[in-house]
Image (cartoon, rainbow, N blue to C red):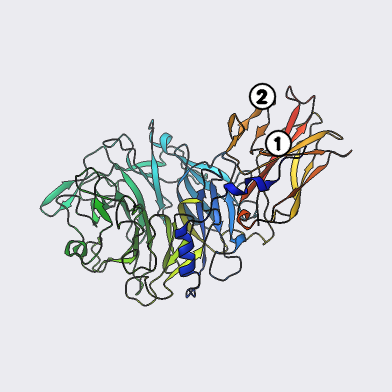
Amino acid sequence: MRAPPLLLFAPNLKMRTPLALAAAALLSGTAFAQTVNSELVMYHGDSVLDDWGLYRHLDRDSDGLYMAADELIPFAVDGGIQITYVDDVKYRAEGANHYIYILASGDVILRLQDLDGDGECAGPGEITQWADTRAGGGFSNTSPDSLDFDPITGTFYVTDDNWNSGSQPGSGIHAYTDLNSDGDANDAGEFKQFVDATAVVTVAGTSGQVTIDPGDLESIMFDSTNGVVIGFAQQDLVLYGFQDMNGDSDANDAGEAWNFCNLTLDMPGLEVNADILSGALQSPSCPSSSGTGYYASLEVLDFAPGAGPAGEDVYWMMSTASNASCTSAGGLLYRGIDVNGDLDLNDAGEVTLMTGGPGSALTYPSMYGGASHDGGFSCRAGGGDVLFYIDLNGDGDADDLNETTLMGVDPGGHMVHELDDAPNGAFAHPSSNVNWHEFGTGGTSSLGLVPEIDHIGFPNAGGSFTVTLENAIPNNANVLLAGFSNTVWNMPPVLNLPFNMTAVGAPGNTLYVAGQYQFNAVADASGNASSIINIPGIPSLVGRDLFFQWYCLDSVANPRGATMSNAAQSTIE
């Protein structure tokens, strides 16, 4: 029997939120007044759709926007094998090579490279472990949150907020450098404890040294002009600067840490930004729910050399607080310029509120990832919207005509977390009709062959396409599994994916996709089979990811009597 049509799943699709719809209505007609030379790489997904991974916002039609249905495409979706959760994303060029570095599950740094030039990083050898944050320093537990790199030395700086009512071993800032150029930073001497948060760290205050808490650093940026690491300390609500002044590869010595930017009144004894203190600048804080002090969350930081109105370096700081719990603190984006060159942003006129205040075109309740590019700043809001902010008239904000642009939307309304930009052309641009991404490996049949999945056409709402199979047992039955997830199959019982099928009698085989829908197909004398998939003509289906895998009956291959093919993902257009 053929499984029920995909139409049955349509009512469960997530709809765009009213806020996102309001943004589209307000901003979609805005003339984009800036050439975009970047694309965006971000980690996103949805707990209901179970489609977590890295995706690209790619400007295929060169209109400066990412609004078309084919401009949000998978970049590194590997079925949950290595990429199941991501804490930060950074693009880096190394000579002629282009990489994406991510903080991923297992507290490791992964390096992604498109080796075969197909525009994505999910194939063999394209996702490798660059550093293990536990093994590097010999820690039993780490909790890396944010990373940035020195473009000169190649050193990556990583915050570790392993903080539980106080700094834990390994908390602070780690530094990793691939000294022997073997493609990782896992070798002896390639790890340094740049800031040891279990030691006493002090900075100069208004009347003497003040002991600070760098054990809960939530975000980081590297000032490549001055060689300064800047991190936001969640317990103190202050951005601290760190620099190795004496050349011993750490910033643990006296005078190597300082108050870089203080936009709240929470930390006694520290200088506060002059405009915050006078009330001229809105603070990204609110009274703490504990009844003591304040709360703030500047968890998105980025350094942009030469991006200021007169070619100054820019320090971007974005609040990720939610207005629902921290009134008027959500959606605030600040631009910092060190006007007097004293390596801090606490002087009058050095920090401006670019957007999110009372005069902004649209105030979002929550912001997640963000990145500077093309003279401005892109951020991801709840529901997957991409907004680009740029100060065109030089008044210090992006609240004027044509300065705020809704650049992209996500029809699925995904939760979006981390984000970075890459230059256009750094990664191959898939042609407009490429919408098929294979992943995983198949098992070996009794004939010594590995069943292979393929396709004819692509899934379009209101149309049909064909999923094909090669290397099956001739004249045998096969079942095509199709579903909306590659991380869980709620059968029941619930199966977390990928699932090693050794336990069910098929060693060497892996189930990668949910099989809510199953289609029977008999192989021909050459071991080829196919199944036609009809997609309902419902506009809200556009943007949904579908996952496919063949279950090939093979009575003598193993006790289960079946062999699995590799798997594939495709997006409904």
In the rendered image, is residue 438 in sight? no
- Residue 260 locus on image (x, y percent): 25, 56
Q: Which three-letter amino acid code belongs to the residue tagged 1?
A: Gly
Q: Is residue 263 left or right of residue 495?
A: left
- Residue 127 locus on image (x, y percent): 56, 44
Residue furthest left as drawn: 207
- In the picture, the quarter occupied by the N terminus is top right
Q: Which three-letter amino acid code belongs to the residue tagged 2?
A: Val
On the image, numbered disc 2 is attached to which residue?
504
Q: Crowdedness of circle 1 by 10 Å Cα count: few (<14), some, many (20+)? A: many
Q: Crowdedness of circle 2 by 10 Å Cα count: few (<14), some, many (20+)? A: few
Viewer-proximal residue among 539 and 259: 539
- Residue 304 locus on image (x, y percent): 39, 63
How many tags in the picture? 2
Name the N-terminal-most of marks 2 and 1. Answer: 1
Mark 1 and mark 2 in contact (Cβ < 8 Å)?
A: no
Residue at image position (80%, 39%) is 521
In the rendered image, is residue 101 in sight? yes
- Residue 14 locus on image (x, y percent): 54, 50
Q: Is residue 524 left or right of residue 163?
A: right
Viewer-proximal residue among 197 and 412: 412
* 522 w.r.t. 280: above or below: above
Residue at image position (52%, 41%) is 84
- In the picture, the quarter occupied by the C terminus is bottom right
The secondary element bearing badge 2 is classed as: helix
On the image, numbered disc 1 is attached to which residue?
442
